[in-house]
Image: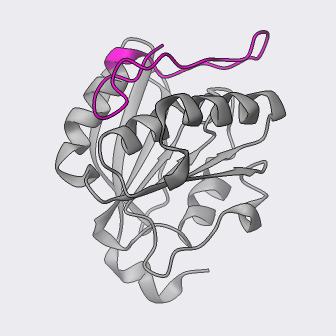
Amino acid sequence: MRVIAGTARGVRLVAPKGLDVRPTLDRVRESLFNILAPRIEGARFLDLFAGTGAIGIEALSRGASSCVFVESDRRALDAIARNLQAAKVADRAQVCRGILPGDWAVVPKKPDGYDIVFADPPYAFHDHNMLFRGLMRYLKSGEEGIFVFEHAARTEIAFPEGFIACYRRAAYGEAALSFCHLTHHVVSDRL
């Protein structure tokens, strides 16, 4: 697994041995960043269920101003730290240990929210509503902020009506990406 483009292009990323990590495939990552390309430069990025950190590192490599990585497994956190050093983007990264959707307190808040939030929970994860409601505190409102959710292509995700508006879904074999905005009228109701 390598960084696909940007300042860290070609840098090999490590994944801990024996860890049940399902890294986002290169072709899915490439498609994701082709879709997000106009919004990456200068973006504040939040990578939830970060695994090896490949998505957030790719965002930093392509010009995101910062990325916060949230992961629960200590071995994955060590891999993220090593990968950030190898890609030479550690100065724009913050790594947090937390189990979502319960540990939102570990996620630093940004005054204007994050520009892009990416979440790739295990495909067996089913507590979607708790996750979606928790992330409301972090995502910029309306079309300014984007939430991208990676999930099994065979799974239809029920996003909370009136909170998250999905505008695009793309499937790549077993994986799918859902692209969403936080709807405008939720801003005053943030938790």
Magenta part of the chain: 1-27
Residue 155 pos. (x, y %): 50, 28
Vertical relation: 133 (above or below) 158: below
Q: Nearer the viewer, residue 146 or 70?
A: 70
Q: Where the C terminus falls, by quadrant?
A: bottom right
The image position of residue 77, as x and y in percent, is 73, 36
- In the rendered image of this protein, does residue 26 appear above or below residue 48? above
- Please say if 130 is above or below 175: below
Q: Is residue 144 left or right of residue 46?
A: left
Q: Residue furthest bottom?
A: 188
Residue 156 visible in the displayed image = no
17 and 93: which is toward the camera? 93
Task: Say how many tags the image has.
Answer: 0
Question: What residue appears at the point 69 percent right and 27 percent down from the top-left corner?
Answer: 79
Is 5 covered by the magenta stretch? Answer: yes
Is 113 located above or below residue 185 in the figure?
above
Tell me which corner region of the image, top left, top right, bottom left or bottom right, holds residue 173: top left
Looking at this view, is 30 or 162 the one in front? 30
Q: Is residue 116 magenta?
A: no
What residue sits 28% from the left and 35% below the top?
Answer: 33
Residue 39 location, x and y as percent?
23, 54
- The reply to whether residue 146 is in sight is yes
Q: What color scheme is it? A: one colour
The secondary structure that most of the magenta stretch takes on is: loop
**Residue 150 placed where, x, y %?**
47, 34
Point 46% across, 72% down: residue: 113
Q: Residue at x 20, y 43 (%)?
A: 37
